[in-house]
């Protein structure tokens, strides 16, 4: 455990220290696209945060290779090298997209090639534990297709949810923490060395996200871009593939005893099939809803819009930070709920706890829909926002201010100077000098 924690800390430190220089490089390189209609930030912010995350990944693998116990992972398995090869390819594609905005189909082809590179080096699904059937060995083509599909789905699910400051990195960090606890239990409790690569991948992924989060929290000073979102999606998928298709269920000796006991003991074997889906349950749901929504409108599934889950939270009335925290809450509930069920599937307390927390999450989700007002006799004892007279006065003042602002705008039009990407003096979310404010996002960029 000490070596895993050391690897995590080194990865986080390298990512954190490199993000600042990478941010300055992104500004100089002009990787600061104009604000589009679907964006929620108001100032041009540099991308290419994935560069720091990729070097954090390399540092984590390098440190692990020189540690006493973790070095055995590199000696007995080729999976770390397979991960590094696929990550390097998907990272290059993401960097090009952050700078030049390449076509979506080209990115999809690059994702499939990166998954194929990992398959060629041994990181693939070899067998599947099927309920009431047992362990089913897959042919080479079946394993390859299933591996590529899982990698592409995970990458795009993480990429789709990357729409608010700190959202994607925080959700993936929560998912990696749950996955690390599961993989470490399989490796330590059952003594299965084949689970060590997945445990290492989860520790490194946590370090990448934790090191980048301080720079990416609202208001973000830098975005990870596709170079970061696709990278962490690929690392998450690689860990799921490693522990699902490489760990032999027969080694766990779970088939002894009565049929009922066998079913309960087999839960840790079935969970790898479900845990990757539960980990990305919120991003995957967003991905499916986006495809259905765009197809129903006659648009391309890759056409961008403002209908994602985080956009809907903002439309309901949640603030930027609260919307991110709500998404964190649901991701943690699903991921750690599945983890707790894999440890003790017969406990009703786990189910009851998940139900109670789900009810609390729904109440927090719908909170902006309710605007309670205190009775008149209690208005002196509650904050001003709950007073009826205060609310009416604010609404009246707003109604008066709108016509005056419209008259002033018609008499004296305001001239704005657009902020060009890569210009000296621009500092992302916190500009040095005069700030650039875009009151109407639809006029600030393209309609995509």
Image (cartoon, rainbow, N blue to C red):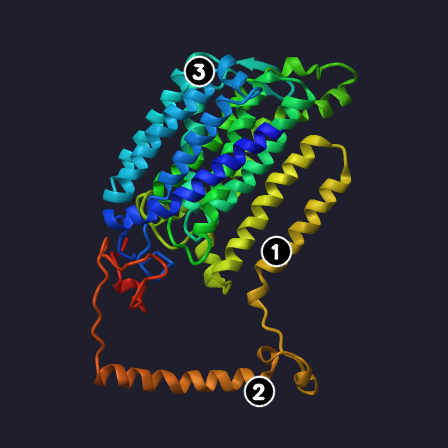
Which quadrant of the figure contains the N terminus? top right
Q: Nearer the viewer, residue 136 or 252?
A: 252
CB atoms at circles 3 and 1 under 8 Å apart?
no
Give the foreground label among 3 and 2: 3
Q: Say whether residue 285 is visible.
A: no
Relative to residue 256, is residue 53 drawn left or right?
left
Element under label 3? Answer: loop
Q: Is residue 58 above or below residue 135?
A: below
Please name the residue that numbered disc 2 is placed on.
Answer: 389
Q: Quadrant of residue 119?
A: top left
- Nearer-N-terminus badge (3/1): 3
Residue 184 on image: x %, y %: 62, 27
| Residue 122: mark in rendering | 3
Residue 177 on image: x %, y %: 58, 37
Give the foreground label among 3 and 1: 3
Residue beneath the point at 50% across and 15% down = 126
């Amino acid at each position: 455990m000490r070596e895993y924690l050391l690897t995590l800390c080194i990865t986080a430190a390298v990512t954190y220290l490199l993000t600042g220089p990478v941010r300055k490089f992104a500004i100089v390189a002009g990787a600061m696209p104009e604000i589009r209609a679907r964006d929620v930030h108001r100032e041009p912010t540099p991308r290419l945060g994935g560069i720091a995350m990729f070097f954090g990944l390399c540092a984590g693998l390098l440190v692990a290779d020189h540690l006493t116990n973790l070095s055995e992972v590199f000696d007995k398995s080729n999976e770390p090298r397979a991960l590094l090869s696929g990550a390097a390819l998907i990272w290059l594609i993401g960097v090009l997209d952050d700078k030049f905005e390449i076509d979506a189909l080209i990115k999809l082809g690059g994702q499939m090639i990166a998954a194929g590179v990992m398959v060629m080096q041994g990181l693939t699904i070899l067998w599947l534990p099927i309920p009431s059937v047992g362990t089913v060995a897959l042919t080479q083509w079946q394993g390859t297709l299933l591996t590529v599909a899982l990698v592409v789905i995970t990458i795009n699910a993480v990429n789709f949810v990357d729409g608010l400051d700190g959202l994607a990195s925080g959700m993936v960090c929560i998912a990696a923490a749950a996955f690390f606890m599961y993989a470490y239990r399989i490796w330590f409790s059952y003594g299965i060395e084949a689970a060590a690569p997945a445990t290492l991948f989860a520790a490194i992924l946590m370090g990448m996200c934790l090191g980048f989060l301080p720079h990416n929290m609202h208001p973000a000073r830098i975005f990870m871009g596709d170079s970061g979102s696709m990278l962490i999606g690929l690392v998450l998928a690689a860990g799921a593939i490693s522990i699902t298709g490489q760990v032999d269920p027969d080694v766990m000796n779970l088939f002894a005893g009565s049929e009922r006991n066998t079913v309960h003991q087999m839960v840790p074997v079935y969970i790898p099939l479900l845990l990757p889906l539960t980990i990305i349950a919120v991003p995957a749901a967003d991905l499916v809803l986006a495809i259905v929504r765009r197809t129903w409108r006659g648009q391309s599934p890759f056409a961008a819009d403002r209908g994602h889950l985080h956009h809907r939270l903002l439309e309901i009335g949640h603030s930027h930070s609260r919307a991110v925290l709500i998404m964190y809450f649901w991701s943690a509930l699903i991921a750690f709920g599945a983890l707790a069920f894999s440890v003790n599937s017969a406990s009703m307390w786990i189910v009851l706890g998940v139900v109670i927390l789900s009810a609390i999450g729904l109440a927090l989700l719908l909170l902006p829909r309710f605007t309670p007002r205190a009775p008149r006799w209690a208005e002196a004892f509650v904050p001003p926002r709950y007073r009826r007279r205060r609310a009416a006065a604010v609404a009246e003042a707003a109604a008066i201010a709108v016509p005056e602002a419209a008259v002033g705008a018609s008499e004296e039009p305001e001239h704005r100077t657009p902020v060009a990407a890569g210009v000296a003096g621009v500092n992302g979310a916190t500009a040095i000098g005069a700030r650039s404010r875009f009151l109407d996002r639809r006029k600030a960029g393209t309609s995509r």
